Amino acid sequence: MTAQVLLLCAVWACASNLTSRGFYEGLAVLKGHAGEVRAVAFSPDGLTVASTGKDATIRFWNVALLELSRARETAAGHTDSVYGLAYSRDGKRLATASFDRTVRLWDADGKPGEIFELPGAAAFCVAFSPDARLLAAGGDDGTIRIWRLERRGRLVRRLKSHVGTVYAVAFSPDGKRLASAGDDGVVRLWDVGRGRLAASLEGPKNGVSSVAFSPNGSVLAAGDWDGYVWLWDNAPKPSLRAALKGHAAKVWSVAFSADGERLASGGEDNVHFWDVQTGLDQTEVLRAPDDGAFSIAFSPKGDSFVSGNADGSVRLFRLKGL
């Protein structure tokens, strides 16, 4: 039996303990982190999943080749828990945000690059602009910092409006708006070019942990601490589209599928899948490990998704019929 066949057998043996229902099927449980996995992301080419969390390491998994018995690379440099992780659209760089009061850049293989310090503030989230020229990060001082990455990154904006920690930031696909959310329960939209607040979106009553724009930028989603998933039409004057209730506990993460037709939400209890047009829960609830799924992401092709979990695992699933 060849090494490749043995590897595939090992992967499917791991997957045997995962749920297979409706439109998703468990592929593998990836283990290596010591402690909670707080953030996961697919590389833009779909070949790699990056993960990070409480152990302050960044691990790179060869998901396309099913080389899942161990991480391809492990990068270290942070000195405390890492809460945010994002790829640039061209896949050349990765950014991480940490409780150690730094935001760090890495190349696609985990080689360390620039380090941006947040004096007096822990960093909880990070996002690249679509053209990869800007990097935004939210901290526990209620401030969003934006760096221009050309010519040895420099700080160009400090957006201050939130009260408490900023847990989530996301650029719109055209790069003109930045969404942010956090402790204060208000989702804010910023005009990136002017560095001004464009809108404050009411709805959530308590904290908001995640925000995401649909691939075409027409819809903004957010997940809150009361178990709601919120949808707004991203128009010049945004309007509330729906408040979706399916979770019985905090929602930690929201992510759109590649075609924008499906939204996944991960929380303390489970992962839900929603029809974006109708707002209907597709009822294929994926039971999360103990204490839930902190982060979820769809692959660029939309044929698989990954979750980063409180039990220290990274779980890979294939979507059926896609």
Image (cartoon, rainbow, N blue to C red):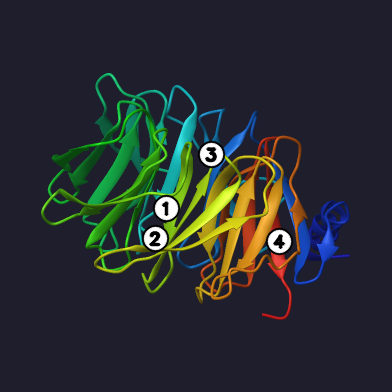
Residue indicated by mark 1: 108
- CA gap between label 3 and label 2 equals 17 Å
Q: Earlier in the sequence, mark 3 or mark 4?
A: 3
Is residue 50 something one can see in this rendering? no
Question: How busy is the neighbourhood of tag 4: few (under 14 within 10 Å), some, or many (20 plus)?
Answer: many
Question: Mark 4 belongs to which amino acid?
Answer: Phe
Residue indicated by mark 4: 317
Q: Nearer the viewer, mark 3 or mark 1?
A: 3
Please report contact status of discs 1 and 4: CB closer than 8 Å, yes or no. no
Question: How busy is the neighbourhood of tag 1: few (under 14 within 10 Å), some, or many (20 plus)?
Answer: some
Question: How busy is the neighbourhood of tag 3: few (under 14 within 10 Å), some, or many (20 plus)?
Answer: many
Please indicate whether residue 195 sits to the left or right of residue 313 in the image.
Answer: left
- The residue lying at 44 percent from left, 22 percent from top is 79
Question: Mark 1 belongs to which amino acid?
Answer: Ala
Residue indicated by mark 3: 52
- CA gap between label 1 and label 4 equals 23 Å
Q: Earlier in the sequence, mark 1 or mark 4?
A: 1
Please report contact status of discs 1 and 2: CB closer than 8 Å, yes or no. yes
Secondary element type, mark 4: strand
Secondary element type, mark 3: strand
Between 193 and 37, the one nearer to me in the picture? 193
Between 299 and 164, the one nearer to me in the picture? 164
Q: Position of residue 266 (x, y in %)?
A: 62, 50
Q: Earlier in the sequence, mark 4 or mark 2?
A: 2
Q: Quadrant of residue 119?
A: top left
Question: Mark 2 belongs to which amino acid?
Answer: Gly
Q: Position of residue 226 (x, y in %)?
A: 58, 41
